[in-house]
Amino acid sequence: MGMAERKHALNVKRSEDFSAWYQAVIQGAELAENASVRGCMVIKPYGFAIWERVQRLLDDKFKELGHVNAYFPMFIPVDLFEKEAEHVAGFAKEMAIVTHHRLEQQNGKLVPAGELETPLAVRPTSELIIGESMARWVKSYRDLPVLVNQWCNVVRWEMRTRMFLRTAEFLWQEGHTAHETEAEARAEATQMHEVYRWFILDVLKMFGIPGKKPDYDRFAGAVDTYTIECMMQDGKALQAATSHYLGQNFAKAVGIEFQGRDGSLNYAHTTSWGISTRIIGGLIMSHSDDDGLNLPSAVAPYHIIMIPMLKADNSQAVLDYCNKIKASLPRDVRAFLDTREFSPQNKKWDYVRKGVPLILEIGSNEVKSESVYFTKRLFLEKQSMSLNEFAKSVEQLIAAHDEMLKTHCEEACEKRINRDVSSLYEMRDFFRSNQNGFVIAKWAGKNDKLELLDDMSISIRCIPSLQSGAPGRCVLTGEEAATDAVFAKSD
């Protein structure tokens, strides 16, 4: 007779209902909740603490590379969008429009009254409004490059919403730069693509494939779009961050024109790049389990939680010892002593659901023996060691947590990649039998027969930066082709 399965901290399993499990992780970790406005969310303090860590790490990297922060209006005149036809077409269905500027009471109800002469779009993205400012700032090649970034909110009126992944309003950073030459702008776009690769794969320990979007799926108005396509635990793809080389399209639309070194007038070459609170959804779906959230240490609000096991005759001694533990830790280790009047068991499972890497339970036994008893979150492994040993090895314990998180994610994702598909029949069979995963197969680069992918609810996610170089035949057209492409369903 087999052992009974351990009870988990969540009431739903990934394997049974991935969507419900995802919502349960968010609720159990107290990351966010639905707002009263349809499609919007309230990011709760613990969820926002994760976003603050994301902000700090990326903001430091951006500034290290010479970028500066600024802020631009959230309201953009609709007629400004008309200056870049492809751009407005790309966002038309998602725009929220302000048409009135005051409310009046009529028949006991508040109704919009003053109509705006020019309707205003609530910022879906800021290429045009920032470009308009750059046009005022740039007169000569000496004014270039312009390297600005803003942290802000964005509104896109999504029909189907899902917390963090797809909401009507979300938070992000958007970098916008203007350059003297195409080569400089392209170097900027690829440099920021590499920054996102570092952050998502190396810092967040997620699994992803860096690459370029096929031409038909570029950002509206861009010449080239670079992406990181991450695989989630359900085998679907998530576009985690993008960087765009915009050519001179936006510069021409809003007049970013400068006098060149030879005295001629030239249009600047521009870029834009961004990552949003969607990455928190990606973290959830990459690392979490049936007990709740799992976090890489870089963005975990706390590395260590101390839970004092208080009794009437030991409370001060235990609290003093907890503070001694905290004082012994390296400065960079984020530790928190939870003195709330809840049972220690409830506290422990609360922090398991929140994904804290190391959970310490400290009582009279630990005080007497000057030891530390703790649970490693990833596999709920329990361990005890002396305080001196713990203080010396805590950074290695945290690093080991990160390494296991990354290895576990990579191994699970690699099992769901098929590199042997050579025909549409084989691709259809893979997605039918395996349900989800990545297929890396040959593509001739043409838009022919893309509707065959739609029939399977899959798409070309990217052209990987690392190509095999091996020849083969396009899975769509049967033509000879040397280019690898990633095919997948999306979350």
Image: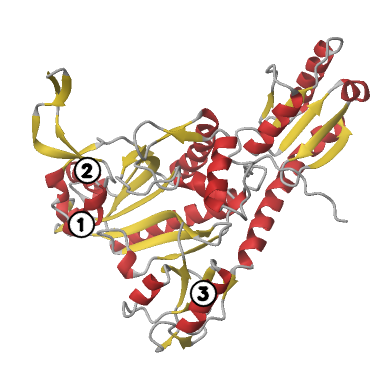
* Numbered circle sitting on residue 89: 1
Identify residue for label 2.
Answer: 129
Query: In the orientation shown, which residue stands out farthest toward the front?
Result: 1
| Rendered location of residue 441, percent (x, y) | 49, 78
The reply to whether callout 2 and callout 1 are in contact (CB within 8 Å) is: no
Residue 289 or 89: which is nearer the viewer? 289
Residue 252: image location, x then y, percent: 16, 56
Residue at mark 2 to residue at mark 1: CA–CA distance: 17 Å
Q: Nearer the viewer, residue 209 or 245?
A: 209
Would you call the spot at circle 3 few (<14 residues within 10 Å), some (14-19), or many (20 or more)? many
- Secondary structure at numbered mark 2: helix
Q: Is residue 336 above or below residue 155?
A: above
In this view, 445 is above or below 263:
below
Dot 3: element: strand
In this view, which residue lies farthest toward the left?
117
Residue depicted at x 74% and y 22%? 343
Q: Which mark is residue 440?
A: 3
Q: Which amino acid type is marked by label 2? A: Ile
State the SS at label 1. Answer: helix
Disc 2 from disc 3: Cα separation: 38 Å
106 with respect to 481 (left or right) = left
Q: Residues within 10 Å of mark 1 (few under 14, many from 20)?
A: some
Q: Locate the N terminus by quadrant.
A: bottom right
Residue 263, by quadrant, is bottom left
Which of the marked residues, 3 or 1, is nearer the chain's N terminus? 1
Q: Do the CB atoms of the residues marked 2 and 3 lie less than 8 Å apart? A: no
